[in-house]
Image (cartoon, grey):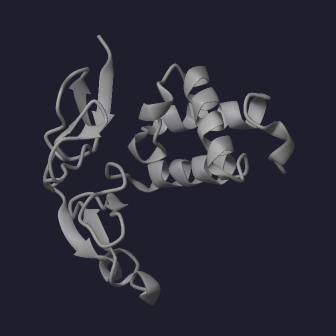
């Protein structure tokens, strides 16, 4: 059985995400925003503004973030919404996700290249490229992606500067 991940919730193939009501990648109804759980503490996260997370970054004050007051894990939201960009992450996982994006973003300059490289990376990780989203990746998945991008010719090696 294939497992899908949507909004940080695992659903079986053919299942519907309880967070956003997606079904096999197709939105059936308007998105429903459900408070995400912190997977470290297993408690509901709190919706806060950027000034709580980044008090020194006035450019982020009006942005939404889901934040766990207990452990400090957080994740940003898509612009102008309450929909999280992934699941909550602690400091280590945020650093790994940033590194994934830094390395991957060097491999493409247009949507066609990006999609091709997501397919290649997903295949090498044993993940369907449609399910490959760094914001929903855990530490192990991020480390695997980083290793692949740094140590293989798998994705567009000529664009890398590392």
Residue 49, quarter of picture: bottom left
Tell me, yes or no, if residue 57 can be seen here: no
Position in image of residue 92 (x %, y %): 48, 50
Q: Residue at x 72, y 46 (%)?
A: 107
Position in image of residue 36 (x %, y %): 19, 52
Q: Is residue 138 above or below residue 73?
A: above
Which residue is outermost to the top?
Answer: 1
Q: Is residue 79 above or below residue 98?
A: below
Q: Residue at x 72, y 51 (%)?
A: 106
Name the side, left or right, on which 93 lies relative to 99.
left
Which residue is outermost to the bottom?
Answer: 58
Q: Is residue 14 above or below residue 28?
A: above
Name the side, left or right, on which 28 lies relative to 71.
left
Name the side, left or right, on which 152 lies relative to 91.
right
The quarter of the picture where the N terminus appears is: top left
Q: Nearer the viewer, residue 56 or 12?
A: 12
Q: Residue at x 46, y 48 (%)?
A: 93
Q: Residue at x 36, y 55 (%)?
A: 85
Position in image of residue 89 (x %, y %): 37, 52
Name the side, left or right, on which 127 lies relative to 73.
right
Position in image of residue 141 (x %, y %): 49, 32
Residue 10, quarter of picture: top left
Tell me, yes or no, if residue 131 can be seen here: yes
Q: Nearer the viewer, residue 126 or 16?
A: 16
Q: Is residue 157 above or below residue 65?
A: above
The number of discs equals 0
Residue 71, quarter of picture: bottom left
């Amino acid at each position: 059985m294939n497992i899908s991940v949507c909004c940080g919730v695992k659903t079986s193939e053919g299942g519907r995400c309880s967070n956003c009501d997606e079904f096999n990648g197709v939105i059936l109804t308007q998105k429903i925003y459900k408070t995400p759980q912190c997977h470290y503490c297993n408690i509901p996260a709190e919706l806060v503004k950027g000034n709580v997370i980044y008090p020194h970054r006035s450019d982020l004050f009006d942005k939404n973030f889901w934040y766990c007051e207990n452990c400090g894990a957080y994740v940003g939201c898509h612009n102008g919404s309450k929909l999280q960009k992934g699941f909550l992450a602690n400091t280590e996982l945020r650093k790994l996700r940033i590194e994934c994006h830094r390395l991957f973003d060097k491999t493409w300059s247009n949507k066609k290249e990006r999609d091709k490289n997501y397919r290649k990376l997903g295949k090498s990780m044993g993940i369907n490229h449609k399910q490959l989203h760094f914001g929903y990746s855990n530490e192990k998945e991020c480390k695997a992606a980083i290793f692949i991008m740094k140590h293989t010719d798998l994705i567009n090696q000529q664009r890398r500067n590392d």
